[in-house]
Amino acid sequence: MSLRRNPLNFSHYILLAVSVLVGCKPSTGPVTTAELVTTKRIAVIVSTLNNPWFVVLAESARVRAHELGYESTTFDSQNDLTKESAHFDNIISSGYSAIILNCTDAKGSVANVRRAKSAGVPVFCIDREIEANDAAVSQILSDNYSGCVALGRYFVKEVGENASYAELLGIVSDTNTWSRSKGFHSVVDRYPGLRMVAQQSGEFDRSKALDAFEAILQSNPDIKAVFCGNDAMAMGAYQALVTEGKAGKVMVFGFDGADDAVRAVADGEISATVMQYPKLMARTAAESADRYLKGSRDFVQRIPVTVELVTRENVSKFGNYGRKE
Amino acid sequence: MDGKNSRHTSGLVSRRLLTVAIVVSLSTYYFPLFHVSRLSTVASPIDFDTLAAANRFWIEDLPAAHADNATVIALAYQTDPSGAIKEHARFVGLGGAAYFFIKGEGKVVSYTHDAIRLVLAGDPAPQIEIQIGPIFGNAVRDATGLLDVNRFPSLEDFNEIASDLNQRVESRVLPPLRARVTVGAHVIFTGCAEAGESAQGQQVLSVIPIKAEVR
């Protein structure tokens, strides 16, 4: 047996194994130029491309990564965690050097991010939070709750302290849905005269919101306002009002700062929306990935991004998914 | 292979295995394959106690935090809001959210069920508003900069702190203020004010008091 004939080889195996195991520890130092040359692709995984706001988010990340010298590809998860998981598998096996992630599920996506981390692929979350502090390198997040606190205060000011209203929720498994709803209710529920007579999910989708709100209007013809968890649903709700001949009689409140909603605020069709900054978040994530790949490890886990109330009083300052330059 | 050679080979194997064992022991001592960390030094989101964090902040951190002179800040804000924010405000995250943490005193010139208008001590004497209605937003949580979002398991927990602190203001600071306020009364206060871009356009700073006394 070769081991007996040359026992020194056995010690070599052990030393080699120890060296490999020690060497397997993830590097915390700067990467080399050679590594950079061979790994220059950044993947952008987005929850859905069936909403213009997310298209802007993904495209802004992809373009900024390209400007920084990386090849960049966008992967659409279609709001499906299984598809997102498959994207991660594909991206990891294809040798991408970093991932910018707009997740589909705050809890479910954590395993995907951990898998990428284990494979040495850093992940930067944008807009939507994952419920882990030790998986992503950094999370650049819209402060949905605070935005809806501001929206709730404006809602009370505009609608008054005595009225019936409805709420269209987003996807019920999405944390943003509840951050927005909780922020809104943290204000509005303080006023007992404001009565929520219907609360349904429009799944962040314009046509589903239209259908849901038409049914709500038929059952509750006296409502004075509707709070929608995003602008797509607000536009759907407004369309339902037009169809029912109630445009201008029921106030519509949205969230996102999508271009069509901002125009609708300017035109008086929607009372208010909340501007998130998809371009700012996406650019910051791409630049963070670039810094990471060049050796920086100085990242904070969560970076909240301010959101701003957009009303008829200040709408002229906004457009193109942000403040006008 | 005879017995002598066999014993010699066996001895050689033993010595070399011993050498390997020593090398492995030393290697793993200096380069351990895993580390055992004290739980107290590792962020433990699951065990995070939001109420305890709010208590600690309200009782220990907030009263000890440095507050700027209200007259100086209010005058600067009325003259040049952007300059005052740049020089004196505390910024949070990306996008322009900023807050002042101030203390001062002044005379009540008017009040409603939501706010007290004060003219501050000083020459010239600027005016500010003290909020006495329902308290919303992140000013109390963020104005001192002592609470870091990254010490919390999620943004939701961080927002719960803001809500908890606002309720403390409403239940502990505002009732005696509302009860004793009269035009001409002297108010000594410490408080937080939003100062970011969304707050610009306000004529005066709107302060949420974390401590107030009417004389």
Image (spheres, coloured by chain):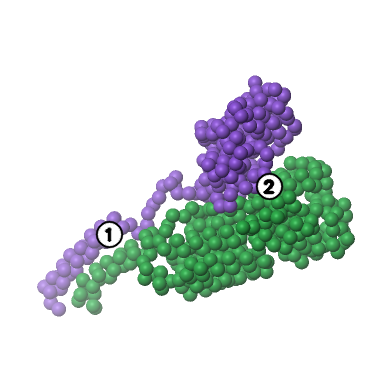
Chain colours: A green, B purple
**Residue A165 x %, y %:** 80, 51
**Residue A84 x %, y %:** 58, 68
Residue B59, compared with residue A133, is above or below; it is above
**Residue A67 x %, y %:** 51, 68
Which secondary structure, mark 1? helix
Q: Residues within 10 Å of mark 1 (few under 14, many from 20)?
A: some
- Callouts 2 and 1 on one subunit: no
Q: Nearer the viewer, mark 2 or mark 1?
A: 2
Q: Chain of mark 2?
A: A
**Which residue sits at x=84%, y=62%?**
A242
Residue designated by label 1: B27
Front residue of A317 and A215: A317
Residue designated by label 2: A149
Residue B165, compared with residue A21, is above or below; it is above
**Residue A272 x %, y %:** 74, 53
Q: Amino acid at mark 2?
A: Val
Which secondary structure, mark 2? helix
Residue A99 appears in view: yes
